[in-house]
Image: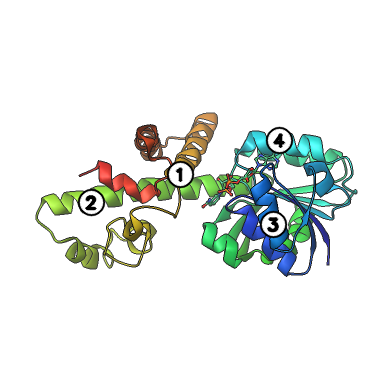
Amino acid sequence: MARVGFIGLGNMGGGMAANLAKAGHDVAAFDLSEEALSRAEAAGCRRADSAAAAADGAEAVVTMLPAGTHVAHVYADALGGTPPGAILIDCSTIDVATARSVAQAAQARGLQAVDAPVSGGIAAANAGTLTFMVGGTDDGFALAEPFLSQMGKAVIRAGASGAGQAAKMCNNMILGATMVATCEAFALAEKLGLDARSFYDIASVSSGQSWSMTSYCPVPGVGPTTPADNGYQGGFAAALMLKDLRLAVAAAEDVGAQVPMGARARELYEAFVADGQGTTDFSGIIRTLG
Ligand code: NAD
């Protein structure tokens, strides 16, 4: 079993660190939040006083932080005591450029680094059933894979450094756009006098079907149980969807890709979040489309 440093013990990282401890690793955990640290301790991790203390002597350092700036700062400050050959695994959702620069800086110090953002929410983080999409070298992937498979049900190599983040933002751009389209269709169906359940029965087995329709239906009482059945609480916060759409649209601008649907979805989530709905589940945007 390994010495692991885990930095960022929030909604996602808390459960992920707990699963590494459960797998028998010696997990030194750090977060700026005292509450998060106490939860991690209760879940079998060892409390570290700083990011550098968590990473000191670690064979693997895992980060699950809000955004690219946090990741860049933590890795710039924390790696003094990390032994050569250690693997840095950033599971946060961040921009491709930061992921690549973290990996380059790590390699310059004799460390390996992969970007390994996740699909799956808090429940999957707690249950150890996340999907990881991994960007990095062959050696980096080989070192990271055993740790990732103890936190997830699938570990998929996306390509070179930054490819995991590219896959994540492209996937979530589809998700944002299909959710808005699904919400629009239910709102239109209602105005056309169609019963929501009848429309679901048809569209869920027709060409309008998508994950947003059949796994995450935005209409309460229709399809499987989803955040819509819980007043749009829990689930995937609209602010996080907006963050991912901003990353995707910014990346598209960088490389000259045309993403008109992604850009429109971003505008709609900008307005939703500006209206104070940042913590509402992202499917709650249906309430603006009636
Ligand atoms: P969160 O805000 O709950 O957790 C982030 C944690 O990082 C917080 O506890 C915060 O105190 C800590 N932190 C911030 N700066 C720090 C620093 N310098 N040193 C140590 N700790 C620091 O966020 P989350 O929901 O756990 O999401 C984490 C990442 O996972 C994000 O990039 C998010 O986009 C991504 N993600 C989230 C979900 C989800 O459903 N919540 C799903 C997939 C991906």
Picture coordinates of residue 269 (x, y %)? 38, 38
Give the CA distance from mark 4 to mark 3. 23 Å
Q: Which residue is mark 3?
A: 40
Q: Which residue is mark 4?
A: 72
Picture coordinates of residue 47 (x, y %)? 78, 53
The residue sitting at 57% across, 52% down in the picture is 11
Give the CA distance from mark 1 to mark 4. 22 Å
Q: Secondary structure at mark 4?
A: helix
Q: Which residue is mark 1?
A: 241
Q: Earlier in the sequence, mark 2 or mark 1?
A: 2
Q: Secondary structure at mark 3?
A: helix
Give the CA distance from mark 3 to mark 2. 43 Å
- Image position of 162 (left or right of 191): right
* Quadrant including the N terminus: bottom right
Crowding near the residue tagged with mark 3, few <14, some 14–19, many ≥20 C-alpha atoms within 10 Å? many
The image quarter containing residue 289 is top left
Looking at the image, which is closer to me, 233 or 243? 233
At label 3, the amino acid type is: Ala
At label 1, the amino acid type is: Met
